[in-house]
Every structure is written in structure tokens, then in C-alpha cells.
Amino acid sequence: MFLADVVGTVVSPVQHPVLEGQRLLLLRPIDPEGRARGIVRVAVDKSGAGEGDRVLAVDEGNAARQLLGAPDGPVKTVVVGVVDYVALGNELVFDARSGAPVD
Amino acid sequence: MYLARVIGRVVATRRYPGLESVALQWLQPLDERGRDSGAPLVACAPLATISTGPGDLVHFVDGREGALACPETFVPVDAAILGFVEQAVVRGKRIAEDA
């Protein structure tokens, strides 16, 4: 699993049936300090996340298929949680509870 | 799963059994600003309902899931287009159009 910032949305009117009705988000993966790291992903939203949220996501087929209830679905990346806060050592490096993210 | 722009197509008449009906396209993965991100790759375009050409935006999946998107799922494929992207919006702005 990885942490990412939701940076946008993707609208795809014509797509594989397993994705019909699913909301697609654009994720920018981050490192523990909150810096952009890795390749931007398109993910299925299963957590009611939106642009600006820091989220927890999986990038693994079996987990994604389980979440979508589609045993043969060609899916991999799914948002599974919205992050409240992140601690690195004893220090809070991100805290959505207090308002502005610590970046 | 990733965002990409279609940059071309690949034709291979002789190919592995099971892949006969699957189109092949060149994809350039994109970042959230619509800029090129990483190396181009060839992906299957298994859905007949998705007709894409150069310049179009798509989203695709890589790994084993690429084969799962094909009509025949036990095929040697590691990337497949899952959908045509009408728009990708970042901070209220549409990105990557005709870039």
C-alpha cells in the first residue's frame, strides 16, 4: 500500500464493464515526508475521497478485485482510506485533523 | 492503473493464439500536468467499444491485469487499455488535451 495525494479526477464514459459506475481519481504518490514520488496513478475510489485528500491506496490486483467484488476484473489501484494523520518517528508529519496539511 | 496518451499503433499479423482480435497501441504515460512520464509502452486495446487514435487520452492497467482485460484471459499481455478518458481534471482545470 502507499500514501498519495488526490490531485484530480478522471472521467471515462467508455471503459471496461468492471469500472462502470466507479469514481476514478488521479493520485500522486508521496514519500513519508509528503514529497511527490513515483508515477501518477488512476485509482478507483472506495473511500469517498476527493481532490486535496491524502489517501491510502493499494496497487495490487487481488485486493482490488476483492474490493470491487469482481473475481476476474482487470483492476489494480484502489483508494482504501482517507488519512487522518501520519507520524514519522515521534513527529507528526501530516495532520488533516487540524486543518491545513503539514507540507 | 495509469493515465496515458495514445501516440501510435502497432500491427503484428502473426501473434500468439488468443490475441488475434486485440488491437495494439503505443501509449505515453502522463503525470498530473499532462506531461510525459516514463517510457512509452505497447498496450492491448481489447474493448471494441473503445476506439482510440493518436492524441486520445486513456487509462490503462499493467501486469497480470492486462491479460484479464482481454477476451481470452490466459494470454501473454502485460498492459491493456481500460477506458477512453473524456477529461482529466486537476485543480479545476482539464489537463493533457492535445498536448
Image: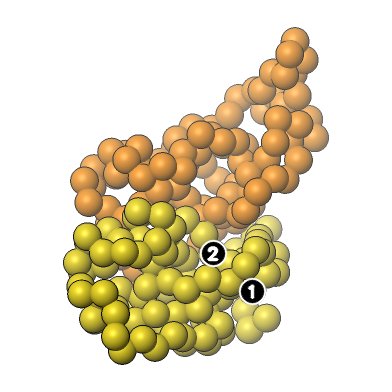
Chain colours: A orange, B yellow
| Quadrant where the C terminus of chain B is found in the figure | bottom right
Can residue A5 be spotted in the picture?
no
Task: Identify the residue under disc 2.
Answer: B3
* Residue hosting label 1: B96
Tell whether label 1 touches label 2 (CB within 8 Å). yes
Q: Is residue B65 left or right of residue A32?
A: left
Q: Where is residue A23 in the image (x, y as percent from the top left)?
A: 42, 53
Q: Nearer the viewer, mark 2 or mark 1?
A: 2
Is A87 situated left or right of A43 in this image? Answer: right
Q: Quarter of the image holding residue A22?
A: bottom left
Query: Which of pointers 2 and 1 lies earlier in the amino acid sequence?
Result: 2
Judged from the image, the secondary structure of the residue bearing numbered disc 2 is strand
- Helix, strand or loop at label 1? It is loop
For the point 63% across and 84% down, the residue is B98
Front position in the image: B93 or B29: B29
> Where is residue B45 shown, x and y percent of the image?
36, 75
Specify the amino acid type for callout 1.
Ala
Where in the figure is residue B47, as x and y percent of width and height? 29, 75
Task: Judge from the rendering whether residue A35 lies leftward or rightward of residue A65; answer left or right.
Answer: right
Name the chain under label 2. Answer: B
